[in-house]
């Protein structure tokens, strides 16, 4: 077996945003070892979009921490039967570390953090709690460490987009969407996603409404208020607050792939640090995002993976508490967003 023909298990089995920030790492691994076979262990919720990743050959679903001890052991046996040459855990937990050890995978690499690292013979000190670089860079560092251990020093440097659809398909979906909601095809579509990113702080609905009303564009724009599962009430409330500002409510109920196809035709995606924001980043869409200044949740740590010129980030001013998003002035933000993305 040649170096490039190895079968590698990569683990990123947490939330959607975290998983999307692993796509540059998958690209780095696949492009540096074109003949390797990459299997990804993911949370069942992200499986739909994981199937779209061009650098993943096979998807495995994590039984999650809710599974019984017997099921966890059974899953470890399933992994053992795959005869993996290596496992790279981008974010480890004790449970996953134990399962990979039980699976008998000889090369197991993970961040050197807490008790979980005891289950790995290869560890990389990252000190992610310092948030000195983007999360996607920490993920790539682990892959690069593995490549160096495998004797590969010609490391690929992939560029966005990391997720792509056929342009003809996206154009058709956009046309259908505009026709359904009676939107002028020539107007720019500005998605505002008010949903929460789990523990991430976000703007209030009133702030989002003020922002949406204050946006200016040179050729006309239409706001699409988007909502994923469990977010429709919040999105509906925002749509009501927008009043006469032209807007449409889009409730994604057909899975993450369909949601991503809609995000792909957005001219601009505005959100807090959410999973859909990071889908937009992987698609290399224009993004404007909101982050607290708390070290574990900064704009740098959770930076999107789109090109630098395609993103804006906003945080509370230093005169306010690090988590107080009310210090962000919506009208000022709207002016900056409009000048960068809409008044051109």
Image (cartoon, rainbow, N blue to C red):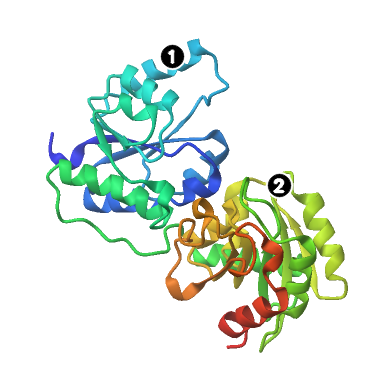
Q: Which residue is mark 1?
A: 74
- Horizontal and vertical percent position of residue 273: 58, 56
Which quarter shows the N terminus? top left
* Residue that lies at the very extreme toward the top in this rendered image: 70
- Can you say which quadrant of the picture contains the C terminus? bottom right
Q: Is residue 49 above or below residue 1?
A: below
Marks 1 and 2, the one that precedes in the sequence? 1
Image point (78%, 73%), residue name: 210
Q: Is residue 110 visible?
A: yes
Residue most toward the front?
Answer: 319
Q: Residue at x 78, y 56 (%)?
A: 235
From the image, tell me which residue sits under label 2.
253
Query: Which one is closest to the eye, mark 1 or mark 2?
Result: 1
Q: Residues within 10 Å of mark 1 (few under 14, many from 20)?
A: some
Task: Using residue 251 as the reference point, say whether residue 237 is left or right of it.
Answer: right
Instruction: Residue 326: name its quadrant.
Output: bottom right
Q: Identify the element where label 2 is drawn.
A: loop
**Quadrant assignment, res 58:** top left
* Left or right: 330, with 312 as reference point: right
Residue visible at 38% across and 41% down in the picture: 90
The answer to whether one can see residue 181 in this image is no
Secondary structure beneath label 1? helix
Q: Is residue 154 left or right of residue 252?
A: left
Asked if labels 2 and 1 touch by Cβ distance under 8 angstroms, the answer is no
Which x, y percent locates residue 74?
43, 14
**Label 1, label 2: how far apart the Cα atoms are:** 33 Å
Observer-nearest of 148 and 265 = 148
Callout 2: 10 Å neighbours few (<14), some, many (20+)? few
Q: Nearer the viewer, residue 205 or 35?
A: 205
**Residue 236 spot, x, y in % from top left:** 82, 57
């Amino acid at each position: 077996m040649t170096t490039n023909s190895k079968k590698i298990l990569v683990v990123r089995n947490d939330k959607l945003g975290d998983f999307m920030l692993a796509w540059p790492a998958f690209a780095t691994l696949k492009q540096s070892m074109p003949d390797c076979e990459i299997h990804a262990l993911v949370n069942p919720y992200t499986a739909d979009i994981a199937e779209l990743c061009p650098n993943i050959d096979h998807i495995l679903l994590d039984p999650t921490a809710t599974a019984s001890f017997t099921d966890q052991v059974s899953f470890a046996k399933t992994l053992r039967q795959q005869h993996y040459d290596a496992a790279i855990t981008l974010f480890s937990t004790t449970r996953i570390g134990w399962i990979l050890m039980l699976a008998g995978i000889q090369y197991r690499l993970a961040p050197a953090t807490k008790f979980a690292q005891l289950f790995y013979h290869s560890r990389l000190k990252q000190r992610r709690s310092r948030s000195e670089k983007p999360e996607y860079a920490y993920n790539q560092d682990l892959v690069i460490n593995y490549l160096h251990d495998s004797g590969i020093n010609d490391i690929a440097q992939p560029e966005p987009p990391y997720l792509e659809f056929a342009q003809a398909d996206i154009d058709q979906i956009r046309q259908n969407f505009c026709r359904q909601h009676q939107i002028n095809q020539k107007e720019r579509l500005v998605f505002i996603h008010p949903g929460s990113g789990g523990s991430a702080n976000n703007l209030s609905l009133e702030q989002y409404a003020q922002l949406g009303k204050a946006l200016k564009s040179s050729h006309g724009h239409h706001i699409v208020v988007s909502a994923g599962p469990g977010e429709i009430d919040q999105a509906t409330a925002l749509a009501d607050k927008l009043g006469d500002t032209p807007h449409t409510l889009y409730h994604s109920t057909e899975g993450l792939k369909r949601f991503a196809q809609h995000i792909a035709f957005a001219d601009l995606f505005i959100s807090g640090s959410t999973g859909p924001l990071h889908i937009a980043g992987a698609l290399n869409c224009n993004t404007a995002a909101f982050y607290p200044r708390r070290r574990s949740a900064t704009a740098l740590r959770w930076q999107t993976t789109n090109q630098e010129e395609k993103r804006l980030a906003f945080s509370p001013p230093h005169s306010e508490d690090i988590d107080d998003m009310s210090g962000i002035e919506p009208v000022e933000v709207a002016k900056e967003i409009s000048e960068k993305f809409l008044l051109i």
